[in-house]
Image (cartoon, grey):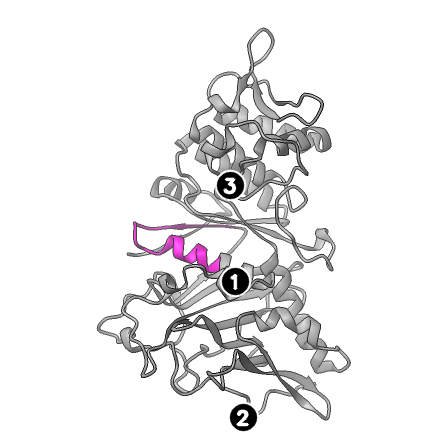
Amino acid sequence: MDATLPAATPRPTPVSPLSDAPSRPAEAQPSAGRRTPPASPADPAVPAVPTVPAQRHPRAVITELRLSAFGVHRRAVFPTGPVTLFAGPSGSGKSQLLAAYEALAALGSGVTLEEAFPDARARIPDRAVPDAERRRGFRLGCTVDGPAGPVRLDLAVQAEPALRIVGERLSQDGQILLATALRDPGRRSVQAAWLTGGSVGVTRAPLPDDRLGTALLPLRVAGSTAGQRQVLAAAEQMVVALRSVFPCDPAPDRMRAPVPPGEGRLLRDCANLADVLRRTRNECGTRHALLTEAARAACSGAVAGLDVRAPAGGTPVTAVLDRGPGRPATELARLGSGELRFLALALVLLTGPGVLAVEPAAELPSARQVLTVLADDFDRGLDRRQSAELLRLALLSCGRGHIRLAAAVGEATADAARRLPGVAVVDLQA
């Protein structure tokens, strides 16, 4: 079915909360990277939809992040691959880029706007001018490739005076599959229209203005027509890719103390590293051996192994470096911050969803999903040897197709990565 949404598709109100006033050519400071065309004047809330060449990835992965108007970024497009490192001076927007990635992932998991953007006003573009009703906001989006082909998601968010979605578009090959618009500012809903096909053509219904409509489509679309099946395939591919994201920011000060035994799923701050090492040692000897090898290459002194002390009776678990026969083991509490961050990041790269505190799409077998690790200040506190070893692990793990890495790094790590085949370094400008 080649039906498209008709001209009467609901559009955002003419007075957009996403004013482009500060983006005049004389003032614009667009981010580095490939640029998208300016937003269509007829639809100020959602960027124009160019056709994206099909790549047909066997698993759903995010291949492009778009920040049309987000913090310091304007009309910026960032392609992402298996290992993508973002480099640039302070103020170039590395952290904002990863924050946008993380927020989209959270929305794909079904959280509210307030949960995804706890600091929404900080995401309003620099020098953004409020409209006549004193509204301001931001725009972002991504492309997910997979078995259904490339699918685009574009989102317009009002941050002031109230946080709400004012426009969302899910499209494929230039065809709009879902479009939402804020028609009545007095109601906490948006008017949605999605492709149905057949004699109906389009289905219209209200959706909440604080949640991603694409994530709600599998609950609203029956899949009884070719058009509905196309919408479902695109929405499910988008949601699978967005949900399979693990933001990681190891906090060494929280990793030193013994931890109570638990389910052995690594938290975002890696505070329960000792408990997860207990689990990997008992359940996955191959990966634990790889982690030990990495520790041997990047930690000071002799390293014969990674071990845990877990007395019976539910007492706290302590992780240690085995220094070899006749030498006392070293507890993690005595390691440097760089060593602890290294161990945590190495563990993340060598494991997967079953060991990390992430809930990927349950309706799809894990073998058909790809986990994306997000890491801001990836190399913070690491020396060159440790950074090089993590890059080696990233290439090893990501080359298998089940894990991807998107991280912000310093110039020294970026310079070393530029010489490595398989690593994409995206340079930002302040």
* Amino acid carrying mark 3 in the image: Asp
As for residue 429 lying within the magenta part, the answer is: no
Residue that label 3 marks: 269
x, y percentage for residue 33?
A: 38, 61
Q: Position of residue 351 (x, y in %)?
A: 63, 40
Residue found 39% across the figure and 34% down from its top: 381
The type of residue carrying mark 2 is Ala
Seen in the image, is 108 located left or right of residue 73? right
Mark 1 neighbour class, 10 Å CA radius: few under 14, some 14 to 19, many 20 or more: many
Q: Secondary structure at mark 1?
A: helix
Q: Give the mark nearest the N terminus, 3 or 1.
A: 1
- Write down the region rendered in magenta: 83-101
Residue occupying image coordinates x 72% and y 93%:
199
Q: Secondary structure at mark 2?
A: loop
Residue 329 in sight from this viewpoint:
yes
The kind of residue on which mark 1 rests is Leu
The mark found on residue 37 in the picture is none
Give the CA separation, mark 3 to mark 1: 20 Å
Looking at the image, the residue that sits furthest to the left is 26
Mark 3 / mark 2, whichever is N-terminal: 2
Q: Nearer the viewer, mark 3 or mark 2?
A: 3
Is 67 located above or below residue 199 in the figure? Answer: above
Q: Which mark is residue 7?
A: 2
Instruction: Return the residue found at the far right.
Output: 224
Residue denoted by label 1: 104
